[in-house]
Amino acid sequence: MIDGVKTKNLRVIPDERGRLMEILRNDDELFIKFGQVYMTTTYPGVVKAWHKHKIQSDNVCCVHGMIKLGLYDSRQDSPTHGEVNQFTIGVHNPMLVQIPPGVQHGWMCVSEEEAVIVNIPTEVYNYKSPDEYRLHPHQNEIPYDWERKDG
């Protein structure tokens, strides 16, 4: 696992009215601080990658559909520099993935329906000076292939 990346398996609590799933609590061991909560979607087969932050940590959870979440440790001083992690998360594997600053990340929707992702970053989005550093999704130095692995 990339240094500083943490995961939390999420528990779904169903009853006759529907279901409930807690994503992140301020008494969780991996809770850092609250910045904001936002929702984003990704259409089937679309890759949203790569980007990193210098200040914020992200707390990513897919609440509808499924995504393949890729992480790459681009931090020169990290003991796991150059490592890649992949998580397949969503309705069939409810999980929260905490991504520390400096770790490149992105995802691809691998379900047949649109994926809905909730992110709980530790900082609010700064419209005038965003903490966003992007790379092309396919043409970069990251040793990761977004293609589906058939077989």
Image (cartoon, helix red, strand yellow):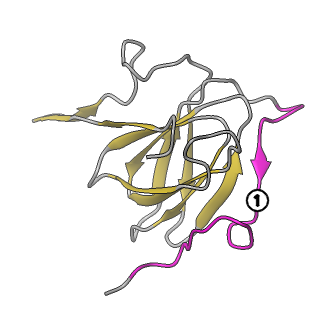
Rendered-image quadrant of the C terminus = bottom left
Residue sticking out furthest to the top: 27
In the drawing, does residue 48 fall left or right of residue 116? right
Q: Is residue 136 magenta?
A: yes
Query: Residue 103 location, x and y as percent?
Result: 62, 44
Taking the spot 50% from the left edge, 45% from the top edge, the residue there is 2
Frontmost residue, 83 versus 129: 83
Q: Secondary structure at mark 1?
A: loop
Query: Residue 121 location, x and y as percent?
Result: 59, 30
Query: Residue 24 location, x and y as percent?
Result: 40, 25
Find the magenta span and give its range: 127-149
* Quadrant of res 95: top left
**Residue 38 sits above or below residue 104 on the image:** above
Number of numbered discs on residues: 1
**Residue 31 sits above or below residue 58 on the image:** above
In the drawing, does residue 39 fall left or right of residue 123? left
Taking the spot 37% from the left edge, 30% from the top edge, the residue there is 23
* Magenta stretch, overall SS: loop
Please state which amino acid type lies under the numbered disc 1.
Answer: Leu
Residue sticking out furthest to the left: 16
Frontmost residue, 24 versus 54: 54
